[in-house]
Amino acid sequence: MKLKHMYFHHPSKLENNEAVIQKFENQGVSMKKIQEALGRTNRYVVPTDSPETSLSLGIDAAKGVLRESKISMNEIDIIAFVTCTPEHQIPNDSIFIHQALQGKPDTMCYDINANCIGALLALDQVAQYLNNSKTAQKALVICAEKMSSILDQENPVTAFCFSDSAFAFIVEKDDTSAGLVDVHYHTDSSFCNTVLFPPKGHSCFATGELTMWDTSFDGSGSVEYATNKIEDFLRRNKLSTADISLFLFSQLSLKNIEIIKNHFNLPDHKVPFYSKEIGYSGSSSPLVALDQHQQIVKPLKEGEYVLIWTLGAGYQAGLMLWRF
C-alpha cells in the first residue's frame, strides 16, 4: 500500500499572529504561556469577503494532488472527504467533489467527521478497504477545514490556533509489504462537553453561534495515553522507537509534542513540527508534517517506518504504524 502523493492547499492570506497576541496582552491576558504551549507564528485565513469554503478548498487540493501525481480520476475508486466544517449535509460533500472532478460512476464517496483525528481514521479505513477489495486500487482522501468562520475570536486559545486549509493524498494498493501495519485507538468520552459546535446542538442552534472551547481541555490525557502505550504498541509489532524513522505527532500543541519527545528521548530531527509557520490544519496535521518534512528535509525511503499519534475533540486518540 503506497502513501506517496500529497498536496497542501491554502488561501492566499497568511496572517501573522502577533496582532492577535498583542490584542489579548492589551486586555491583560498573558499570552506567553499559551503561545509557548501551542507554538504559533502564522496561520492561513480565508478572507471575510472570499467565497472560499471548506469544499472549494478541498476541490483545489484534490486537483493539485491529481495534477502532480498524474493520476486520472478514472483510476480513483474511493473519495473520502474529511471535515468538521462541511458545506453540505445532504448530499455529502464528497458527491460534489466527485462532480467537480468528473469521477467515474463506480466510485464510493463518503464524508467523515471525527474532528482532528479524521485523517488517521480515513487512512485506516481506505487502506483496510483497498486491502480487502477485489477491484478497488486507489483512494483519494481530502481533508479540509474553514474553522475561521466558527471559532471565537475572543477566546485566547482559538483566536490564533487554526489555519483554514486543505490537504489531499492518494492511497494506492500494490503488491509490496508497504502500508498499514497496525493501529490502536483510545477514547475518553468524559470530555465530550469541552469542545462543542453548535454549543447546544443543532436542535437549539442560533445563527452566529461560535464553537464553545473549554480552555481546560489541553489534550494532556492523550499525551499520557501516548507515553503509556507507544512502547507496547511498537513491541507487539516487534519494533522499538529506534526503528521509527519519523514520528508524526498532532501539530496542535508544541508542548505536548515536547513531552512525548522527551519521555522517549527522541531526536529532534525525527519529530517534525510545522504549525509554527503554517498554523494548525486540524485532522490533516500529522500528514501535513510528513509532506513538509519530505519536501524540506528529505523523502522517506522504502522500508522505513513512521508512527502517527493524534487526537480529536471529545476526546479520541490514536496510534498508527505505517511502513513506506
Image (tube, rainbow, N blue to C red):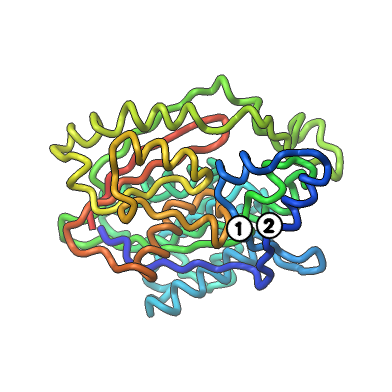
| Coordinates of residue 191 in the picture (x, y in percent) | 58, 24
Packing grade of label 1 (10 A; few <14, some 14-19, many >=20) is: some
Packing grade of label 2 (10 A; few <14, some 14-19, many >=20) is: some
| Coordinates of residue 218 in the picture (x, y in percent) | 57, 33
| Quadrant in which the C terminus is drawn | bottom left
Which residue is at the far right? 207
| Quadrant in which the N terminus is drawn | bottom left
Left/right placement of residue 294 relative to residue 166 reads left
Mark 2 element type? loop
**Residue 129 or residue 245, whichever sits in front:** 245
Q: Is residue 314 above or below residue 85?
A: above
The residue sitting at 47% across, 38% down in the picture is 256
The residue sitting at 77% across, 29% down in the picture is 200
The residue sitting at 69% across, 64% down in the picture is 15
The residue sitting at 67% across, 41% down in the picture is 157
Q: For the residues labelled 1 and 2, say whether their Cβ atoms are less than 8 Å apart.
A: yes
Mark 1 element type? loop
**Residue 131 or residue 188, whichever sits in front:** 188
* Residue type for callout 1: Thr
| Coordinates of residue 278 in the picture (x, y in percent) | 56, 61
| Coordinates of residue 55 in the picture (x, y in percent) | 63, 61
* Residue type for callout 2: Asn
**Residue hosting label 1:** 41
Left/right placement of residue 272 relative to residue 137 reads right
Task: Quote the CA–CA distance across marks 1 and 2.
Answer: 5 Å
**Residue hosting label 2:** 17
